[in-house]
Image (cartoon, helix red, strand yellow):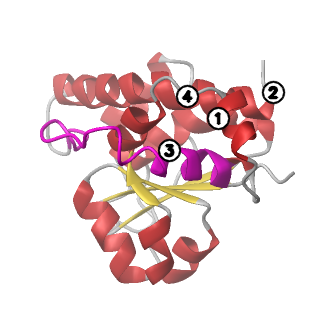
Amino acid sequence: MRAGTVLVVCTGNVCRSPYIEGRLRAAIGGGGVEVSSAGTRALVNRPMDPGSRAQLAAVGGSGEGFRARQLTSELVEEADLILAAAREHRSAAARTHPSALRKAVTLRDLADLLEGITSADIRARGEPGSWVTQVLSAALARRAIVPARQEQIDIFDPIGQPQSGFRRMAAEVDDALRVVNPVLREGLRIS
């Protein structure tokens, strides 16, 4: 079974999405999942913001070699899962390519939908496709029983903020990934 692809989307592709990409790659990239990011109004070819790079370094990651890129219909079409930093990014992905309607979700919404799900639950569904596709399908199937967030939906945008803003962004991301990463990792049998 193919592991799958995850595309992380924010606005400039220099703060939130590269941090999320780095954290996801560290957690699940070893299982064959391809993780990348892009921006709806990307600061194309710019490196990761120093604030995000510092937060990533604090957890053992690196932003070295990272360059921002623009969200394109090709990137949306190729992804199995589009993780949006905010609902506006999910909407922008859908405007870029219609396939995003069935595979784009905010990071926090995905965490809410996956709370309490195990890889065994996902395998029991018998869905076809990559592991990432199966995880997304299981999450979306729970929309009828998991209330949608009404607040604290979007990951804080730290652009132009002091380091405390970047710490807030990292804490929000890490809190959501606390739920998402184990489900993805467990299914890929990453230790």
**Residue for badge 4:** 117
Inspect the image, locate mark 3, and give the three-letter code of the amino acid beneath it.
Answer: Ala
Which of the 4 quarters of the picture holds residue 174?
top left
Query: What range is drawn magenta here?
Result: 132-158
**Residue for badge 1:** 184
Q: Earlier in the sequence, mark 1 or mark 2?
A: 1
**Residue for badge 3:** 139
Residue 189: numbered disc: 2
The location of residue 69, given as percent across then percent down, is 46, 67
Circle 3/circle 4 CB separation < 8 Å: yes
* Residue density around tag 4, few if under 14, some if 14–19, many if 20 or more, within 10 Å: some
Inspect the image, locate mark 1, and give the three-letter code of the amino acid beneath it.
Answer: Leu
Please tell me whether residue 55 is drawn above or below residue 8 in the rendered image. above
| Magenta stretch: helix, strand or loop mostly | loop
Q: Say if the magenta span includes residue 105.
A: no
Task: Tell me the CA gap for discs 2 and 4.
Answer: 16 Å
Q: Say if the magenta span includes residue 138.
A: yes
